[in-house]
Amino acid sequence: MARLVDLILSSVLLAGLYATMAYGLGLIYGVLRVVNLAHGGVIMAGAYLGWVLHKAFGLDPYLSIPVVIAVTFGLGVVMYRLLVRHLPRGAAGGPASLLLLFGVWLVLRNAAYLLFSGNDQSVRTTYSTRAVPILGSYVSVNRLAVLAIALVTSVLLHLLLKRTYLGRAIRAVAQNPDSCTLVGVDVERIYTITFGIGSALAGLAGVLSATIFSFNPAFGSGELLKSFVVVVLGGLGSVFGVGVAALILAVVEVFAILILPSYLTAAVGFVLLVLVLVARPGGLFGQRVLG
Amino acid sequence: MRPRPPRPPALVQPRTALAFTAAVAALAAAPFVLRLSPYTHNLVTLTFLMVSGALAWNWMGGYVGQVSFGHAAMFGLGGFVAARLMLLEPPSPAPLAWLVGGLAAGVFALGAHPTLRLRGPYFSIATIGLGEAARLVFTYWENFTGGSSVLSLPIDVDAKIRLYWWGLGLMAIVIAASFVIRRSTLGLQLLAIKADVDAAGDAGVNATFYQDLVFVLSGAVVGITGGLYASYFSFIEPNDMFGFDRSIGFVLMSVIGGVGTIFGPVLGAIVFVLLRQFLLASYPQLYLGLYGLLLIFIILFEPLGLSGLAIRVARRFGRGHRAAAKASIA
Amino acid sequence: MTPRITSIRRSLFLVLAAIAASVAPPAHAADQLRIGATLPLTGSEARIGGFFKEGYDLAFEEANGKGGLTVAGKKLPVQLILQDDTSTQATAVSLADRLVNSDHVDFLLGTYASHLVEAQSTVAEQNRVPYVNGGGGATKIYKRKYKYLFGLLSPVELLGTTLMEWADEQQKAGKLPRPAKIALVWENTAHGKDFRTGVHEFAQKSGGGYQVVVDESFELNGKDFGALLGKVKAANVDLFLVDAHLPDYITMHRQYVASGMCNKVVSYGARGAEHDAVKALGQENVNYILSGVWWSPQLASKNPQSKRFVEAFQKRYGGRTPEWFQALAYESARVLFAAIEKAGSTDREAVRKALAEAKMDSLLPGGQIEFKAEHGQQVQNPFVLQQNEPDGTAPIIFPHDVASAAGVAVNPRCAK
């Protein structure tokens, strides 16, 4: 029974992290129809940024979130205006966008190597290894904080998309960019902002990950793939969908250890990805993704 | 009297075939004539292998238009099957081992059939998933691959030297096959599929069958390349063979050179290998970024890659009109 | 494609080949001995790569400080040609190939980490170049019975065995239950498998004294060990034995502590007392961790070679104390030099023979080394077990002839 509680708690905590990682990817794809392969790179950038702020100014990683978000938003804006803007839209841009953003990721990785060396880094605070007892099980303080922030983020994101003018504009552009131009929405500006927000979310995921994992410039590829799984599972319809999908992925991964050797539990996500893509391309909640 | 219907253009111009054969013969004779150092000899061997792999990838990525980020799975499978066969008592002869490795890889590609229904980025993402899953499973399946460690083959220096000609032969076959596929009816059908799979289906092209066919061929050839690669290094390691970086390598080679052409992957593979060797020794800290920048520039400015650049330069000097027309973009 | 394109392509190919062929190898100065090596100077093992470099540098400086090696009456300075293999096997192999066939080095020194050494040694063997390494400890590397490969790291199986021997003493003294439950977690490499074999074999021969209830592997440079640790936690074991490299050790142990786990005996194999780990994890979290090392600076008080090395190192590197990385690197180079001098020649075959027949004094535990053919030319020197103490030291606790403290048998934090 204690074991079950342990597993459930682990799943929930992990889901929070996965959801935060996936939002950025999902938003950019939903609106721009661009698969952001640099997503992992921006996550890594967020992690390093949080680490640098902690190392140089002693700034607690959670307090550095606003700074990280602002900087990665800016990074996203730059990436869009400099590069992504020039890609052809729609299906024709498919492979091109993948490859372009992959190139960006390589550059980000290399920049990190040059700036920080390839050594593993981690953010160590006084409470890094502290745990609180919950329901008879010990839960790491950091993981709880990540979950809390993830929940707050999803609420804020939901509010942004449903209640603000910007959010409505974003959703409108996602549905039909041409009509939006007709009614006077500056589509390019929306794209820019969306890419920025997507990157900011990735940066947030990065700094949160930095409090739990150690990382190096190659960090982010695993996270990118898991984000794919979540976005594909959850479809593009809703923030809520992404949250549930993250939970599903987390549960599957965590409970898989009961039947699989722990080494292979990482493969579970990928198998799930392929199965969902092939069997139910619309995800569990969203629209069709074929064609 | 009715005029005879015009004969369809020959698959291969006699002049092309002659030039091609001459080039292959020249390369075959090169080690004897030029007295290459062992290092260069090996480097050229490796280049032959990478060219073969890049061209085979391009059949999917360029001809059919399905960009695979998971070809390392077939490369690795081919390599490990071949290596295991060569480690048996008594060891299989290398060419047989390579072929069986290719066969295994082809079967794996057949198994990935369901993903072929997906289009564009979804196919690519699915291949990422497949590639990573394959990597994890095979690194875990230590009895097959030796785990995260290396699988060592017995050292045979003469065999490594002879790999030059095996590699050359493989590359020649793959180039010829690329040419034939491209120029034949199959090539047209693939072009149709690439442009619009549904319309192609309406026009009577059996998209599923042809995509499967090309995927299996592509996988099998990449698998054979993996086998030769294993023989070349006398060791292989699952994280290297099945790794994401390896998959990306195939993509890079074709894109840098020019996706969809024949010249492209050849040039791209050569550049990739040489650049990698040069950078690893002199500026190991920069080669990731350099590839990234190359990719970015190519996507933004010259989607046809270096071969596109070459054509533009040739056209500038007034020599490439027919070349530009013939080297189809698709 | 038009014939023109075909011929363009082909001529391009030939031109490139010609260029590559004409890249002239650098002239080989006959009055200097060139020794090639790669190390992970960037990448996941960069910190340790840097340490190995310190050891190599010290050895080369020492040799050149005497004017070089004395070979057949002449003084021959030595030069280290060092490349960065970024902790990747394919790179390590390419660079080794280049060092031998393009830079024409005379001998090779090893890189760090078993999987890299295993791959690189193939190149050395193919080209018949003696390859002396202090960075690869997995027995698999040496099972191939290569003639040109010489290893100064004792097999990792012995590490597992040594740990268990100590645990056995504790059990016999009543400090550990009988049977004692073990959770065995190992990295999915030859290194990890060796460790696992060592522990398993001991457990099997113990006649029921130990049960391995968890036996799981993990991927090198893993990120999230949550599920794995959850399984260990649920199994309620007495001994938590892990074989991991430094980055995984730090990641895993953080998550271990953060999930409130505590076991009577904890070991991360060769890891534990590293300064970097203490900095990353905090002293209180690494207390009482046992580690088995190939060499410890504390041996300086028992072994004159170690003493000499420690003093030279501290003098050269501003008073810092070396760990086993620097010692093994230094020793590899020194052994190679000694063999060259003994052979009286720079001929690769002669030096190979000198190494194969060597019986030298060494700073390694045991005091002497030999590269016996039956062990694939891998030394079989014993390990020393250290335990982290709350005061920041990590005294040797086993074997008793070099121990300076008695080990604390059960972690006081969780003696249940």
Image (cartoon, coloured by chain):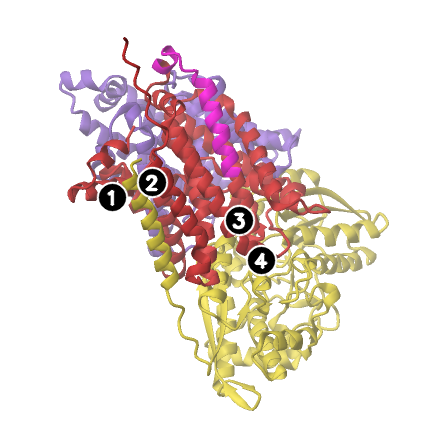
Chain colours: A purple, B red, C yellow
Label 4 lies in what chain?
Answer: B
Q: Position of residue C372 (x, y in %)?
A: 72, 69
Between tags 3 and 4, which lies in front? 4
- Residue stretch in magenta: B199-223
Labels in figure, total: 4
Q: Give the residue pinned by disc 3.
A: C251
Task: Please say whether residue B59 is visible from this viewpoint.
Answer: yes
Please tell me whether mark 4 sits on a helix, a strand or a loop.
Answer: helix
From this view, report whether residue C277 is shown above or below residue A230. Answer: below
Give the residue furthest to the right. C207
Q: CA distance from mark 4 to mark 2?
A: 31 Å
Residue C72: % across, % down: 58, 88
Residue A9 visible somewhere in the drawing: no
Q: Residues within 10 Å of mark 1 (few under 14, many from 20)?
A: some
Which badge, 4 or 2, is on the more N-terminal residue?
4
Viewer-nearest residue: A91 or C20: C20
- The residue type indicated by label 3 comes to Thr
**What's the residue type where badge 2 is placed?**
Phe
**Label at residue B310:** 1
Per the rendering, the mark at residue B158 is 4
Q: Chain of mark 2?
A: B
Q: Nearer the viewer, mark 3 or mark 2?
A: 2
Residue for badge 2: B263
